[in-house]
Image (tube, rainbow, N blue to C red):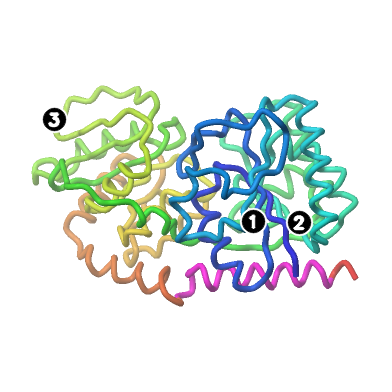
Amino acid sequence: MKVLYVTVPSFFDLDISLIRELSNFCDVKVLLIVSPESMHLSAFSIEELRKQCDIIPATNYTEIHKYSNLIDLQKWYIANNPDNSIKSCLKLKNKIDTLIDKEHIDLIHSTTTCKTAAFLLPTIKQFKNSLFTLHDPIPHKKISFLRKCYYRSIYWSYENLLFLSDSLIDSFREKYKSNNRVYYSKLGVYDYLSSFPIHKNSYDKYILFFGKISYYKGVDLLIESYQQSNASSQGIKLVIAGKGDINSDIKNENIILLNHYIENEELASLIQNSLFVVLPYRTSTQSGCVMSAFAFNKPVLATNVGDFSNVITNKETGLLVEPNDISSLRDGIDYMVTTNLALMSNNIEKQYKSNGDRSWKNITWNLFCTYNQILKNSK
């Protein structure tokens, strides 16, 4: 089976592990669509784009060579879109069509709604054997009418949809009146982070929030909950690492704010040196932050929203508390700083590493079975 996996740099962190394991089951080629807006993201960063629209072997980009022990660079290609113009998108679309024919691709699996991908929709509709991964079935914020129409065109073009959570399927079907075939998958740990060196702990004992700071992530609730908890009096600090507006009055000297974009090397050290990670989200679908924490076997305290209850086993790999509830989050912090975190870490190791139920090996085997089912359905 030959699979073309179409994605973008914003998913590079999970795609590294996914493609590495998926390659054991089928012949998969990865097409990473890169435009000026996506040159510098969490795991993926390149210095410059080529001036021409083209499909370029990833081996030509020295910045990606640091991952050569995790992925087969011979299977990865950069779809180079120099200016994201309509003209460039059309040129790139034609080159992708040629690649599909040349490589005799059996199935196209896409993860992206980027501009170039929009021009591929006629190809997808005609191709039939296609699968689209929805990372956010229901957007966190209100979207424009045009954007909503674009999403509908995606769901019209792809007969098969892959959800990373089953918590929003009913809401999705109601919102988009979807009759697509639906499949499910899971997220595994973002183990690429373990390839970065770990630096000395600069903050002693601390709990960690990391990621881009947005209102829906509830950082303001976390600050108030922490200040009410017993953690500060016990000398346990709160580190908030990420770019964005806090909109909170921080009066506690034990709250450390790293209000900038967190590079992977810094992130790996912050997670490894923390006691546990806290995600006080108001809303969510699934979060790569959990998988980043679990890559280092760090337990996660999170609000019970989105898919968190499916990836965090309550009181075994972390703790789930009520959303939008300062007292519940405060009590959760107090529970986590007094519980056996080492036991939780061992549970994460068993579930997500080696051949556990949530290991990448099992995830990719199930995805391969999904591919087979799609090809069977089209006959």
Q: Where in the figure is residue 66, as x and y percent of width and height?
A: 43, 51
Which residue reaches farthest bottom?
355
Q: Amino acid at mark 1?
A: Phe
Circle 2 is placed at which residue position?
108
The answer to which of marks 3 and 1 sits earlier in the sequence is: 1
Q: Callout 3: few (<14), some (14-19), or many (20+) C-alpha neighbours within 10 Å?
A: few
Tell me if label 3 and label 1 are in contact, CB under 8 Å. no
Q: Where in the figure is residue 254, as x and y percent of width and height?
A: 15, 35
Circle 1 is placed at which residue position?
163
Question: Is 77 located above or below residue 246 in the figure?
Answer: below
Picture residue at 67% right of the left edge, 37% below the top:
80
The alpha-carbon separation of the residues under discs 3 and 1 comes to 42 Å
* Number of numbered tags placed on the structure image: 3
Circle 3 is placed at which residue position?
253
Tell me if label 2 and label 1 are in contact, CB under 8 Å. no
Q: Amino acid at mark 3?
A: Glu
Q: Is residue 185 magenta?
A: no
User: Helix, strand or loop at disc 1?
Assistant: strand
The stretch of residues the image draws in magenta is 356-376
